[in-house]
Image (spheres, coloured by chain):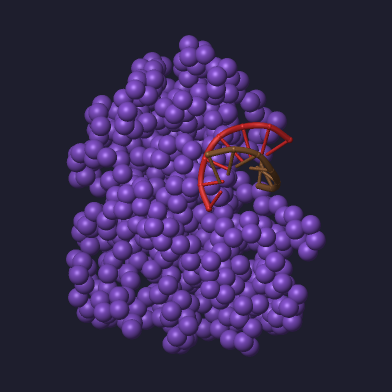
Chain colours: A purple, B red, C brown
Amino acid sequence: MEAVFVVEGNDEGKCEEIGVEKSSSSLSSPKQITDPVVYKLVRVEGDGRLVPATDDEVMEVEDFLVDEQIELPVVMSTGTVECISNESSSGKPQKESSEGLSPSEGKEADAKLSAHLEEIAPSSSLSLDVSHINESETKGECSKHPDGPIESVSSASAVCTSSKRDFYASNREICLDNLSIRELHELFRATFGRETTVKDKLWLKRRIAMGLTNSCDVSTTTFTIINKKLVKNGKDNSLQNAHDMHTEGSDVGAKNLGYEDSPKSHNSQLENHQVVSAKRSGSLSEEEYGCEDHTMDQRAAKRVRKPTKRYIEELSEVESRDHSPKVISSAKTAGHEETSPTCSARPLRNVSTNERTIVTRLDSLGGSGVQVPYVSRVRRSRPRKNIMALMNFNPSGMGVTAKLVKETLAVCTSLPESECADKVLKARSASEQIKPLFAAEPEKDKRRSVMSTFEHGKNLGLKQTDSSEENSDDSIAAVPTVKGGMRRKHHRAWTLVEVMKLVEGVSKCGTGRWSEIKRLSFATFSYRTSVDLKDKWRNLLKASFAQTPPDDGSRKHVAVPIPASILLKVRELAEMHAQVPPNLGASKLTANVTRSVHQTRSGYL
DNA sequence: TTTAGGG
DNA sequence: CCCTAAA
């Protein structure tokens, strides 16, 4: 049983990490993996030594891989390596995005891009809020198209009648090109829900673009996003694609869902947008099982929720010193688009070395195969208290778990390892007091229960950690109180990505089917209950129909405005589902929409 | 259990 | 976000 990997840079000599020892092997794969590589699970000791992993760890990683819905190699029981890719449901291998460059190439490209971007005169306006419904320019100017939008918008009402037409039938764009660093930082935060201190504009744009487009293919010279698709500039045919998007009837819907298509597949007719979403959710797609198959969906959701991934990531939460990619793909990438999983590791440009909190690592986002940056994972407040809870469920001595807890503590708190160990011990002794709390946890929090004790423990311990989207620095869904039992969900700001997912979910399932949406689009966002979705949608609705854009400036840095493009989608969906606020006359509405398209900024995350 | 609404 | 009624 070989396999599996994830190598992390190891800066501090203190913390051990699960690492991988790459060993050559020539397993044949059922897929077209030309250069199979088998990884052996090892631990990376502080001094760099590699020691064989324990069985526990091996299992952990296996779990992890199963959980990962992105293209990680999974060692099947047969010993063969299978590549789980986003394409698994459609059967064909995912084409490698243009990011599949060799490290050197990537850097070169980056340099060029940077140079190019510097040429572009920075605009003072926050063009993010500009929403067009026309094909966009890609010269980095994000110029407005005075009239184009109206036509498409007015068609929104038509959408209502044409039963199944996708609401994404018009193009909208978000332009990142002219944003200042500060604006990019804001957008970054809004998009991923975490801060970043990276000063590199290109990097920021790229990250944000990745998040907003649900893809890694952001190797463009300009960053204009239309409906979750990056409009490319230059040699390729994406401009054409963008044009096609808003001219081709039913094809539009699918494309505009924004999931990455290889250039080749752009021309394929995707009548049903579910096909696209299938790609997105990998093997758990609704394409295969259908929206109505609750059994499978639940199973899928369960899988995704397993804590192992977060667990691994927790261990990886170490600042990286080098600039090497943190996600390692099994297949070679460069030049082998046939065999390369999408979004496989890509060299990342890096960030100032003294910014220890920056980890340029790609993560899976919300189970949808989105790659997001791994940034600023530093704990803003106190160390996770729930780390302690971890011990309750594995009180069997300083085993692997305890060790890991110690490591985690070390990572999270920067405390000397000795101190961490101390805390661990204290935690253990305190377990008796903590345990009853969980046992007595009110039913409401069973939302995420039904796990083995050990898993439960891990989950509690790592719940708040895990990765980019589904993690947060310090929040826990619920905090049991000794007495009143009242607890409040630590307010968790909605990220752009989440909002987009919600909108997308509504577009697929319609409003009201929050559970369904939760399962389909928020499976990996263990927080965000269906009620949360409902509430958020209500807010979005309100925002989207807001007559007067809230005057910013006062709360400028408090909340990031929701891109008008998204609000527009919301509005369209609302109309489709007859959710238009009654006080809003139809004619008035049209006017409002028009206005919105041009300048609105009515709503915050 | 899930939705819809009010708070 | 929370809570509750209703389905």
- Whether A370 is drawn above or below A40: the answer is above
Question: Looking at the picture, how far across and down is residue A340, in whole percent?
Answer: 26, 61
Q: Residue at x 57, y 54 (%)?
A: A527
Q: Quadrant of residue A411?
A: bottom right
For this orientation, the residue located farthest to the right is A483
- Whether A432 is drawn above or below A240: the answer is below
Question: Looking at the picture, how far across and down is residue A56, in whole percent?
Answer: 48, 83
Q: Residue at x 25, y 47 (%)?
A: A262
For this orientation, the residue located farthest to the top is A587
Give the position of the C terminus of chain A as an image quadrant: top right
Q: Quadrant of residue A166?
A: top left
- Whether A156 is drawn above or below A266: the answer is above
Q: Nearer the viewer, residue A445 or A99?
A: A445
Q: Quadrant of residue A460?
A: bottom right
Question: Looking at the picture, how far across and down is residue A331, in whole percent?
Answer: 28, 67
Task: Residue A184: tell me if it is visible.
Answer: no
Give the position of the N terminus of chain A as an image quadrant: bottom left
- Whether A81 is drawn above or below A518: the answer is below
Q: Residue at x 38, y 40 (%)?
A: A508
Q: Nearer the viewer, residue A294 or A338?
A: A294
Q: Residue at x 47, y 72 (%)?
A: A8
Task: Residue A20: tell me if it is visible.
Answer: yes
Question: Looking at the picture, how far across and down is residue A515, in whole percent?
Answer: 48, 47
Q: In this rendering, would A294 be left or right of A416? A: left
Numbered label tally: 0
Q: In this rendering, would A192 be left or right of A31? A: right
